[in-house]
Image (cartoon, grey):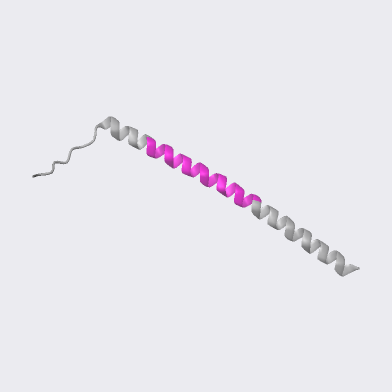
Amino acid sequence: MSSRHTSPEPEKIKQTLARAHRNCQKMEFAGIQLEEVIAKLDREILTQRKQRLGKALEQGQS
């Protein structure tokens, strides 16, 4: 038994590459959305820290 390697059809290759490219775009889009969520959480954390420090400083002046 000899195994023969056959090349896929050019149209099949084209479709596979198009799907791979689309999936890559989806992953990049999801990564950008994740970065936006992380940035929003970072801003919220900074705001909370600023408020706590502001209150601590006000209490220290009393």
Residue closest to the far top: 11
Q: Is residue 51 left or right of residue 14?
A: right
Q: Residue at x 65, y 50 (%)?
A: 40
Magenta-drawn stretch, dominant element (helix, strand or loop): helix
Residue 19, image x, y percentages? 38, 36
Q: Quadrant of the N terminus?
A: top left
Residue 62 in the image: above or below residue 36: below
What residue is drawn where x is 13% and y is 43%? 3
Q: Position of residue 56 (x, y in %)?
A: 82, 66
State the count of labels: 0
**Looking at the image, residue 11 lies above or below residue 24:** above
Quadrant (top left, top right, bottom left, bottom right) of the C terminus: bottom right
> Where is residue 14 shown, x and y percent of the image?
32, 33
Please say whether residue 31 is one of the residues in the magenta stretch. Answer: yes
Q: Inspect the magenta stretch and tell me whether residue 45 lies in it.
A: no
- The residue sitting at the front extreme is 1
Residue extending farthest right? 62
User: Quarter-wise, where is residue 7 in the image?
Assistant: top left
Q: Quadrant of residue 18?
A: top left
The residue located at (17%, 41%) in the rendering is 5
Q: Which residues are magenta?
A: 19-40
- Who's the residue at 43% across and 40% down the image? 23
